[in-house]
Image: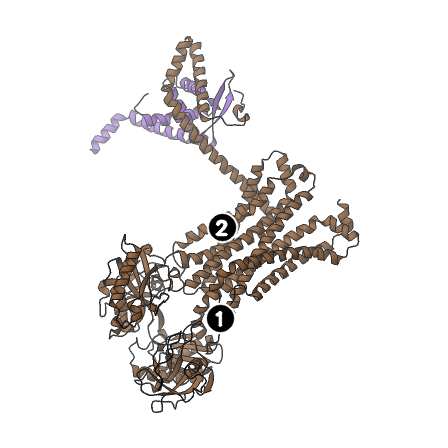
Amino acid sequence: MPRFLEVFRLSGREPSTRDDVENELQFHLAEMEDMLMAQGATREVARDEARRRLGDIERLRKELRMMAEDTRRTVRRTQWLEDVGSDLRFAARGLMRAPGFTLVVVVTLGLAIGANATMFGVVDRLLLRPPAEIPYAKDIRRVTVARWIGEKLTPPWDAVSYPSFKALRDDTRSFAAVAAVTVQNMSSGTGAEARPIRAVLATGQYFTLLGTRPYLGRFFGEEDDKEPSGSPVVVVSHTFWRQALGARTNVLGETVRLDGHPYEVIGVAPAGFTGTDLQPVDLWLPFNTAGTYSFGSDGDWRVNQGWQFINIHVRLKDGVNEVAAATDAMNAYQAIQEPERTYEKRAVPVLGSLIAARTPGASEGSDAQVAAWLFGVAAIVLIIACANVANLVLARGVRREAEMAVRLAIGGSRWRLMRMLLTESILLAMLGAGVGLLLARWGGDLMRGVLLPGVSFESSGGEGRVLAVTAIATIVAAIVASLLPMTRAGRTNLSGALHGASRQVGASSLRLRTGLLLVQTTLCTALLVGAGLFVRSLNRISGLDLGIDTSRLVSIRIDLGSAGVSGPEQQGFYRDAAERLRNTPGVRAAGAMQGMPFGSNSAEGIKIPGRDSIKVMPGGGPYFFRVGPGALEALGVRLIRGRLFTPADNAGAAAVAVISERMAQELWPGEDALGKCFQAGQDDRCREVIGVVADVHRQELIEADFLLYFTAVDQQQPTATPSNLLVATNGPPEQMVEPIRKELQALRGDLPYVNVRPFEEIIAPQKRSWRLGATMFTLFAGLSLLIAAVGLYGVLSYLVSERTRELGLRAALGATPGTLLEMVVRSGIASALLGVILGLGVVVVVAGKLGSLLYQTSPRDPLVLLAAGAVVVVVALAASVVPGLRATKVDPMEALRTE
Amino acid sequence: MPGADLDLLRGTLDLLVLRAVSAGPQHGFGIAQWIAQVTQDDLRIDDGALYTSLHRLERRSLLKASWGITDKNRKAKYYQLTPAGRHALARDTAQWTAYAAAMFRVLKSQKEAIRLLERMG
């Protein structure tokens, strides 16, 4: 048996595979020659014969070399994997030995990574990704229209008339498809069985425009949407199919009754598909079919250019340039506008992104902006968390300094040591990512449900992107958290550490840790200011005087018209309904009205005898609501002068009106408006002003000044039909929703869906972006504050334990516990104060950009700045007290003995 | 045995090589000698093919190689079985034995086989 010696390995460098192969062949040739010569051949013959027997030696060399290269690569890879495996095992063992440290780090990183994953999910849905299941998303444009009023171009608005849609569809050449949609709230079934349906009415090219493929059956096309009344077919959403149709595959051909009209089910949309908007949709109907029932069989909506209620989408033809397409659209749009609509004649259609939040004039813009800010905030939380983890790792590193030194002393390489640290951080970050993803899953659902209702997050494709972002956040966290401790590992002072003299090492580490702490408090302060600003905005917006009392108000809407109930019959129903509700327990007042604040409203010109014109207000108008008996009382309007309507103000009595305070001041400044009169629209009667009420908001929380008046529905000629019932409740309005619905269903058995909503629910979407900002900013700021507090606590505790000797000496020399406590707490507060000052500096620089998202709140609101600073200082104080108290308990004898 | 049954040969050669090192680490030349001895030169193996086989087996992690010094004080590359190689040797030996036995049976009873075919045809 040969002796084995790892000849080449000892030289420390691997020989090249070329040498390896060469040596092996040379050995073979040498042995063969020896053998042949032993059999009697001459040296020359032996040499030739040995070579001959190897065959084509050049080819063999090449072949062997290639295989050897391959083998070496495989070996290296296996070796590397083994190393990583052993590093991981080592790191895992180390972490299990320090469960407290591991728990704090994993939870900290988990919260931060979870926050990032959640916010990215929201930003991705609102701002980055088009609605689900739309293959042609890239080429689809949302059309909004900007109009000229005087010399001013208005912001674009996404509602246009049906004739304008037809012009874009028929008179342009740039588009592969043009489609219009409008949302219609419908009802399936009657009486107690009635259910609300969110339907989208779409024109014939809608589905070909999107390129979506049905899950079952087919989508409707142009042949189903022919004027005047299309064909009665319906495409249901995947969710509707599952929930209302029992997910049966044989539903095609069945009938669904909507607002009392039958539609044949021809297809099921794929899961997650919500059309061109993000709100969930129950079903899609051909525009002309459902439009005939919903907008009137006279077809006025098809020709009337004043009826602007539909949204247009276009798909660009291949290779058509955007500018040319926009010009094409503009020419077609302007050509068909009636000359008297001067603002439309020069209107400019704008082709915006399919992603609504990116299109000017479409919804969700401010939500998306706030979400984008919050994503940034989540990233800051992650930075704070990383700083904290780095801090904890450093603290652990100091404790492990001796261990490290020993490892170095016995020949461990510094690189290997760093790799161990990095492995440990990656392991921690991965555990954190796991926690984070769980949080993002549970917390995210909760957050989206509460703060972003009505946005469908159910769809494919988003998860992968969220995971990718989480992975990036994790890697960044691991690297950042281990980078600083790693540079320290690289510099470990061998002899110093081995001799237990960690004082010097500790000092530079402490500087680093104080620096990290400063970063944390700075960012924390900035986040707290952001939270404060949003909370203040939300408070201001919630405290707005809307002119009505929304806290105890319920709105009821029943679409009797689409169900085919005649006008006079509807009027009778509303009268009876109001009467019945007034006698229902828990109801304070009830009444019917045409239109509703924050609902629909109408405008009509007015004339005052003896005046040429009425002042034009920035908010437009004058607007009016026609109210039935009890409606103003139910709304809770505040009477300033005169009286409200009484049942005596009926068709036979003199025409009267109640006007807003603004209208009284604008039309009769300095005079008493009571007893004055004005004519409205085509009505010849001069309506006497009998009351003045505080200004009532028309449809938005923030709106420009306008004139508003109320008339009695009974005095209208021709008779007006109410559209809403309003009820003021004694208790919380949520509790009255079901009793009210039951009362109305008892009054008439065949009602379509009775939509009863607490009024606050109707206003809530308008407060959404502020609520989103206030809640999430506060949550994130609180989170980072907690993390920073842990960091401060850690640093101070370390400081106290490092200075045990000094503190003991001081105590021995007569320092009172109070002095010692003060010493520690003061250093904590000092670093917090510096952070606060820097943080406020950051805010002053950055805050301007936040201004547009706030409401009547300066981004440099001194109260908010002060409060944020105070919170940080108080938390710092709390975090310093425990280490401070520990300092007072240092036993002088004990401390001196360790020296 | 040139040309014809290359696939068979390659599989056979690999198996032979595995068997050759099963007793303990051995270098290429030694393996060649061992094969020549046990087959009594019935199977003449091209030396080049042997080295290709050795490297192929090393690449497949069936063999592990290391450098050592021979009795004559020469540096040589020694091959030995890895656990995977030991496993492959056992498996292939069993397969080969079964295969050879089957072939043997068929070839021995060739006449019966022809009769069988005629009856079916």
Image vertical order of residue A470 relative to residue A86, above or below: below
Between residues A352 and A460, which one lies in front from this camera angle? A352
Q: Position of residue A101 (x, y in %)?
A: 60, 50
Disc on res. A541? 1
| Residue B53 in the image, given as x and y percentages of width and height | 40, 25
Which chain is indicated by disc 2?
A
Q: Is residue A331 above or below residue B55?
A: below
Give the residue at mark 2. A473
Q: Within 10 angstroms of label 1, few (less than 14), some, or many (20 or more) residues?
A: some
x, y percent for residue B67: 50, 23
Q: Total label count?
A: 2
> Label 2: how many residues lie within 10 Å, few (<14), some (14-19) or many (20+)?
many
Is circle 2 on the same chain as circle 1?
yes
Chain for mark 1?
A
> Can residue A179 be seen in the rendering of this structure?
yes
Q: Which chain is purple?
A: B
| Residue at (45, 12) in percent of width and height | A34
For marks 2 and 1, give the CA distance.
35 Å
- Name which residue lies at 24% across and 67% down: A336
Residue A12 location, quadrant = top right
